[in-house]
Image: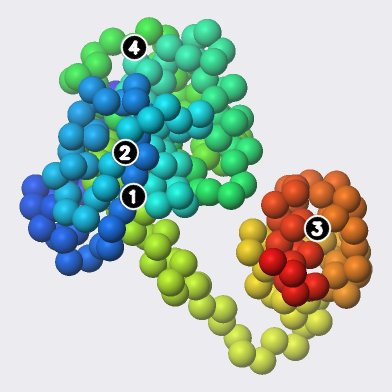
């Protein structure tokens, strides 16, 4: 398996990454699963300033960053072995069901480091398609533990920038009532365009959503208890 030019471009100029991050990020608090202790990634993360690492047993993922991002790290062999015995997709389902934090998978390694995989290449590629297209789980590639550490911090920085500066919504004079109603619901945490459309279809209007019971909200696909609670809190002014 060969790496794309994108990965090589990412490596260029990254040798002094700790100095770059010193000015550009605030303190990152990263919880590392104790089974990752000897992977090389925690050691690489410790080279960055303003990164605090704790080690403990995590029930989901290998790294929790700022309590907003969950990263599952797998080498090429780590990825292939669970495909063979069926464990991979159980792990992927658990990650895909995570609603309160962003989740991504980092696939680490090169064909030079892992020249032979324990499963056929078509099966490996099929697993990649299932993870990314079917389960919609973001997958990043890295060549080394050092690159994995860089990707973890890049992803965390992008998420923090998004939290500080929400995406701009173009069009100040929105005349479509359904669009106005959708944007109103999207202002609620955890509610995006798809969930807003489901809420409007089920309850007719934002007023209908506001008067819906928690139970009826939770019954909608993709809403769940957390989003239902936030909807109730926004409309009824409760914490």
**Pair 2/4: label in front:** 2
N-terminal label among 1 and 2: 1
Say if mark 1 contacts mark 4, CB within 8 Å: no
Q: Nearer the viewer, residue 215 or 179?
A: 215
What residue does disc 1 label?
29
Which residue corresponds to the image point at 18% horizontal and 42% vertical from the top-left? 46
The CA distance from mark 2 to mark 4 is: 32 Å
SS for callout 3: helix
Residue 198 badge: 3
The CA distance from mark 1 to mark 2 is: 8 Å
SS for callout 1: strand
Q: Above or below — where is 150 with respect to 146?
A: below
Residue 115 visible in the displayed image? yes
**Pair 1/4: label in front:** 1
Residue 54 badge: 2
The CA distance from mark 3 to mark 2 is: 40 Å
The CA distance from mark 1 to mark 4 is: 34 Å
- Whole-percent x and y of residue 208? 91, 70
What residue does disc 4 label?
117
Location of residue 22 by image quarter:
bottom left
Q: Nearer the viewer, residue 234 or 177?
A: 234
Which residue corresponds to the image point at 63% horizontal and 38% vertical from the top-left? 97
């Amino acid at each position: 398996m060969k790496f794309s030019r994108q990965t090589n471009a990412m490596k260029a100029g990254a040798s002094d990454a700790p100095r770059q991050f010193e000015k550009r990020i605030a303190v990152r608090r990263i919880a590392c699963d104790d089974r990752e202790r000897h992977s090389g990634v925690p050691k690489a993360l410790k080279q960055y300033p303003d990164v605090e690492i704790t080690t403990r047993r995590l029930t989901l993922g290998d790294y929790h960053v700022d309590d907003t991002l969950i990263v599952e790290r797998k080498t090429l062999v780590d990825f292939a072995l669970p495909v063979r015995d069926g464990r991979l997709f159980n792990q992927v389902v658990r990650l895909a069901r995570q609603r309160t934090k962003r989740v991504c998978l980092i696939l680490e390694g090169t064909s030079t480091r892992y020249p032979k995989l324990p499963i056929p290449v078509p099966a490996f590629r099929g697993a990649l398609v299932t993870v990314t297209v079917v389960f919609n789980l973001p997958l990043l590639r890295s060549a080394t533990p050092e690159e994995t550490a860089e990707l973890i911090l890049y992803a965390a920085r992008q998420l923090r920038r998004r939290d500080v500066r929400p995406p701009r919504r173009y069009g100040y004079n929105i005349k479509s009532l359904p669009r106005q109603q959708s944007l109103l619901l999207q202002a609620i945490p955890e509610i995006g365009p798809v969930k807003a459309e489901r809420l409007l279809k089920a309850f007719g209007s934002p007023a209908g959503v506001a008067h819906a019971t928690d139970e009826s909200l939770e019954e909608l696909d993709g809403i769940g208890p957390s989003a239902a609670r936030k909807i109730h809190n926004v409309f009824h002014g409760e914490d």
